[in-house]
Image (cartoon, rainbow, N blue to C red):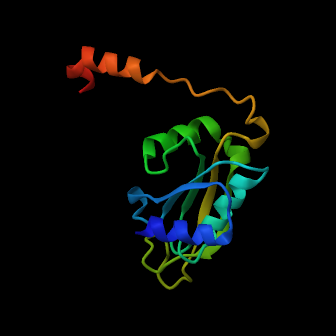
Amino acid sequence: MKSAIITDSLRKTGLPGLRGVWAHEAGGGRSLLIVAIEQRYPGHARQAAYLTAQLPSAAYMNRFTVVVDHDVNPRDLGEVMWAMCGRTDPSLDIEVMKRTWGSRVDPLTLPGEIAFNSRAIIDACRPYERLGDFPAVAESSPELVASVSRRWPEVLG
């Protein structure tokens, strides 16, 4: 439900190339948001991240907003982590927003303190300026995967 609400909100902003949104269960449906886009211009991934992180429907207690390319399934945490590990340069592609909308129920909020939090914006997309020459994803054909699975079902079952 949360993912659909955020998707609708992002569409209303006019963000182009939106392919999917997932408010991941691992983050309690609030703290980890993944957005898949088809990049159309320089800065598009960062724009998608900032818009998502600050949407009223998504901002409360959000801690991580990750943007991935359209070839990554935002619901599959393994694929998201794969994109982060192979497409994110931490010094360039992770930004931290400070003093954002937190909650008193956040275990990191100290008693008596104002409920701010910070959030990381993670660009896990191929660099826009390298879309034409970024290494292709190395993967086996569906036929080979099926053949190997049939041959060793007890291992790959």
The one of 136 and 19 positioned closer to us in this rendering = 19
The one of 135 and 19 positioned closer to us in this rendering = 19
Q: Quadrant of the N terminus?
A: bottom left
Query: Is 57 situated above or below 153?
Result: below
Query: Is 30 situated above or below 126?
Result: below
Compared across the picture, whether 74 is left or right of 148 comes to: right
For residue 72, say whether it is visible: yes
Q: How far across and how far down the image is residue 72, in percent?
A: 53, 43
Q: How far across and how far down the image is residue 52, in percent?
A: 61, 65
Location of residue 78 by image quarter: top left
The residue shown at (52%, 37%) is 82
* Residue at the extreme left: 154
The residue shown at (60%, 67%) is 10
Compared across the picture, whether 29 is left or right of 49 comes to: left
The residue shown at (79%, 50%) is 42
* Residue at the extreme front: 143
Location of residue 127 by image quarter: top right
For residue 30, say whether it is visible: no
Q: How far across and how far down the image is residue 102, in percent?
A: 54, 76
Q: Quadrant of the C terminus?
A: top left
* Residue at the extreme top: 151
Location of residue 106 by image quarter: bottom left
The one of 20 and 48 positioned closer to us in this rendering = 20
Query: Is 23 situated above or below 140?
Result: below
